[in-house]
Amino acid sequence: CLKARQSRRTFTLLQGGTVRLESNAPLQQRHLTMRSVAILFTPCLALLQSAPVWVPIMGKSGVQYFNPASSEMLAKAPEGAKLAPTVTVPQVSLLTQDPDADAAPEPEQSEKAACFPHCNWNCTQPVCNQDCTPDCEQPRCQTRCPRPDYSQCAIDCQTPHCSVFCPKDACKSDDGADCSSPKCSTRCARPVCYLKCANNVPCQNVCHPPRCTWNCRNPSVCAKPQCRLVCEKAKGCAQNYELPALSPSFTVNRQFAAEKARWITFGWGKCGDLCGKSVHTRKVVCSTGEDHECSFAPKPATQEDCEDNSGCNQWQTDAWSPCSQLCGKGVRTRKVWCNNDDAKECLGEKPIGQEKCVDFGSHCKKCSVTLFGGQNFNGWQQTFVPGEYTSDDLIAHGAKCEETSSVKVEGLCCRAKLYEYGDFNQKTDGFKVRLAVGEYDSDKLADKGVEDNDVSSMKVFLDERCAREGQKFPGMKIVEQLGLKAAETAAPEPVSQDQQDDE
């Protein structure tokens, strides 16, 4: 035992009485997990294994006696047993399971956790393509020809250009005599020559693919993720409806003084007529919020007769009507009358019944056109904002030119022009149809001149004159589409298709 302490070694007792020597371990008590058996460490068990002795082990739970030979653990030493020196284990409790394993939750805690299920957001993940266009450099090119056969070629030279050069004093000699033959020289330029061959040399252009980069930007339209909250179902919740134990410092009160239900009345409202006899009303409720709980008592009156003459001989007015001009300057009207039916007896100046107005609401700038496939606005649909769209543009937006069966134009001053050919009929004559605000099925489009449900190009634009100067009410149908309320005094004046086209 002393030698083991000096060498700082620890003897470990394993299940079955086997002893293992651990080197380089600090001299302290340890514990291991074994099934159904408490395994303790002590530095001197090697000396005790050869004798039938019991080792007293002092732990948190008290003294227990361990037989190294039989691995038996008893709470009380056998009679007449030989006892070894007591081993104290103050830092270790006798375990029957792995100390590193998670402890089982207490029943109350597990039930509480089960009563609070987890909730998570479940969201879709829409995928959108970026809007990309290529940016390419000028490609590098060469003209390559096979080597020519010069044996079949001849050189053709033109007549050279020659000139005669004479000295300025050609007719004067040194001796003064006339000179009959001046000293002149002839000079010729190099002739221009061409190589003529009988066969033509085939050449070809060779180009390297251009270097391109993509310019991308985020898409202008991309669906937003749709999220919903998903919660687990609560399981194993305790259904204990028993009251907790009564504390000694509390007592049970068995006498209650609850307030009796009663009717509550509010103040009377104004008389319905400010000049003469009428009725006024008030609100009556039960104090509990449920009228049947006050049914044991009669409910006070909620309406009674009244008379008010404060408004006699006074001018009365209705609300103003909408402006007679949509998206521009117009007039609005209202009804004005004397409440005693005799205008001569009314006091004060009569209020005006008509005034100027200006309408520049958001509906004046609203403009969009939707193309539909299928009959009666069913099937695919694509919406377009103001702009010009060729056939390629329509296809890029998801429209099928040859299947356009109905069109919807939204916006009072919005216009659409439909063309038969994809270049707005610039090279070939075709139908050109102008549409104002409204809905057009295949029959209405055919009446306008659209043939075979084929719309190959389109222009969507805002009629600036309409948005600036407006137009009179074009009938109740369009007014209802705009969410406006036409007054009876607004005298609608229909606008013809020719007038709309001119605008």
Image (spheres, rainbow, N blue to C red):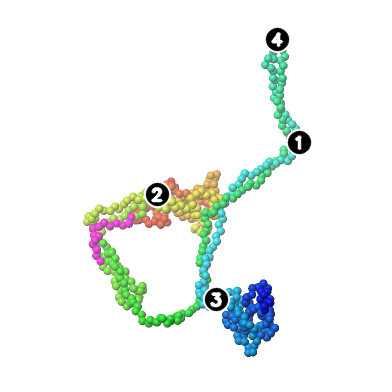
Query: Upstream in the sequence, badge 3 or badge 1?
Result: 3
Q: Which amino acid does label 2 sit on?
A: Gly
Q: Residue at x 35, y 78 (%)?
A: 258
Q: Earlier in the sequence, mark 4 or mark 1?
A: 1
> Is the C-beta separation of discs 4 and 3 under 8 Å?
no
Q: How far apart are marks 1 and 2 (CA)?
A: 83 Å
Tell me the residue that label 2 is attached to: 470
Closer to the camera: disc 4 or disc 3? 3
Foreground tag (3 vs 2): 3
Q: Are marks 4 and 2 in contact (CB under 8 Å)?
A: no
Q: Residue 262: tell me if it is visible.
A: yes
Rounded to the nearest whole Å, what is the CA distance between mark 3 and mark 1? Answer: 102 Å
Q: Residue 150 carries which label?
A: 1
Say few, some or many: other residues with alpha carbon within 10 Å of mark 1 (under 14 / 14 to 19 / 20 or more). Answer: few
Tags 4 and 1 touching, CB below 8 Å: no
Nearest-to-viewer mark from 3 and 1: 3
* Callout 4 amino acid: Gly
Number of dots carrying numbers:
4
Name the residue furthest bottom. Answer: 79
Q: Helix, strand or loop at disc 3?
A: loop
**Any magenta on residue 38?**
no
Q: Residue 176 carries which label?
A: 4
Q: Dot 2: within a 10 Å radius of its alpha carbon, few (fewer than 14), some, or many (20 or more) residues? A: many
**Sequence-wise first label, 3 or 2:** 3
Q: Write down the region rendered in magenta.
A: 306-320
